[in-house]
Amino acid sequence: MKVGIVGFPGSGKTTIFNALTGLRAETGPGGKARENTGVIKVPDERVARLAELHQSKKQVLAETQFVDVAAPPDAQTRGGGLPSQVLLAMQGCEALVLVLRGFANPMLEAAPDPTRELSAFLAELILSDLGPLENRRERIRKETGKDRERALLDKCIDHLEAERPMRALTLDNSETTLLSGFGLLTAKPVLVLLNQEEADFAGGLPGPAAATAEAAELELMAISGKLEMDIAELPPEEQGEYLEALGISASARDRFVQRAYALLDLISFLTTGEDESRAWPITRGTTALKAAGKVHSDIARGFIRAETIAYDDLLALGSEKKARDAGKMRAEGKEYVVHDGDVINFRFNV
Ligand SMILES: Nc1nc2c(ncn2[C@@H]2O[C@H](COP(=O)(O)OP(=O)(O)OP(=O)(O)O)[C@@H](O)[C@H]2O)c(=O)[nH]1
Ligand SMILES: [Mg+2]
């Protein structure tokens, strides 16, 4: 699972990356050239309970990789839009955190205007999706046997031209498969983070930015990147004291991570056995076949079925055998949409 932290220069991407990962990547213009990568473990008590049940030797939590997507200084822009390296890096991510600048940055002349940044960035994403779809439509314009694909491309292009994200378009499985090679950016879940001064929190979310996010059907969350980063960089034993002094009870980073996980529509399925009990992060809507591919590409290739028990059923009944006897084990196929907490045993041909 890879989440890209994206946004315009100087919005605080690296600061927020540091806050999330507890790493110390260089902020400010000097840090621009590098793409920073860090990993966080998602707290999940279900893993420990499953490990207990099966005497697993190992417990593995879901990991989410965060990438601070910054444009290198010599980046090529595409028609005045986002640099191609940035678009490519975003395509490699399964979800995006869009950072808007809500604070006065002394390195930048422009006053903060998060509402404008939000609409401008979303427009960039739509433009970058239209390009390859239009190229493809042109290429297959006269080919026979492509009527379905042409109709699909027409539908997507009309939708995007109406300034709507692919995320909001209902597609069936075969349509999703046809589009999977395009890496469409507006199909990815997006969490919008308004990065503002701590002192500005009292006023709540600024109305215009909130309205723009709502119109785009996106969740908006306000944070103070700088404050969160300062907390994350303190030694663990001092974090508690500092939080207490600020009147915050839970660890800021944990709250932030859990919120981000939920808002980005990330869920976990579970695998368990003597070797290990493990949580695997996926986006909501992932099929059993794709989930199998997360565990191992061989499992996806030889996929037979996904033997699935809901975590709550397995725990209530106490064992796989009892769950099976009680009719709680389902044999699911490739197209099954995996739920949060599904305990899955993949059957596959080698
Ligand atoms: N006052 C204030 N400053 C912040 C906040 N977040 C980031 N900054 C500062 O703004 C500057 C830019 O922050 P970065 O995190 O480097 O921004 P960035 O988006 O990674 O910038 P580029 O990589 O150059 O695109 C730094 O000097 C940060 O210290 C904040 O919440 N409040
Ligand atoms: Mg940066």
Image (tube, rainbow, N blue to C red):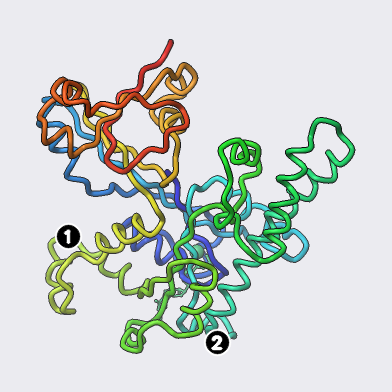
Q: Amino acid at mark 2?
A: Ala
Q: Earlier in the sequence, mark 1 or mark 2?
A: 2
**Ligand 1 within 8 Å of the CB at mark 2:** no
Q: Amino acid at mark 1?
A: Pro
For this rendering, which residue is in front, 106 or 30? 106
Q: Left of 128 or right of it: where is 271?
A: left
Q: On the image, numbered disc 2 is attached to which residue?
A: 111
Q: What secondary structure is found at the residue carrying circle 1?
A: helix
Check if mark 1's residue and mark 2's residue have beta carbons within 8 Å.
Answer: no
Q: Left of 142 or right of it: where is 37?
A: left
For this rendering, which residue is in front, 27 or 299? 299
Query: What percent of the width, then of the height, locates residue 42?
Result: 28, 48
Q: Residue furthest top?
A: 350
Q: On the image, numbered disc 1 is attached to which residue?
A: 236
Q: What secondary structure is found at the residue carrying circle 2?
A: loop
Query: What percent of the width, then of the height, locates residue 209?
Result: 49, 80
Q: Is residue 74 visible?
A: no
Q: Residues within 10 Å of mark 1 (few under 14, many from 20)?
A: few
- Quarter of the image where the N terminus is located: top left
Whether 217 is drawn above or below 49: the answer is below
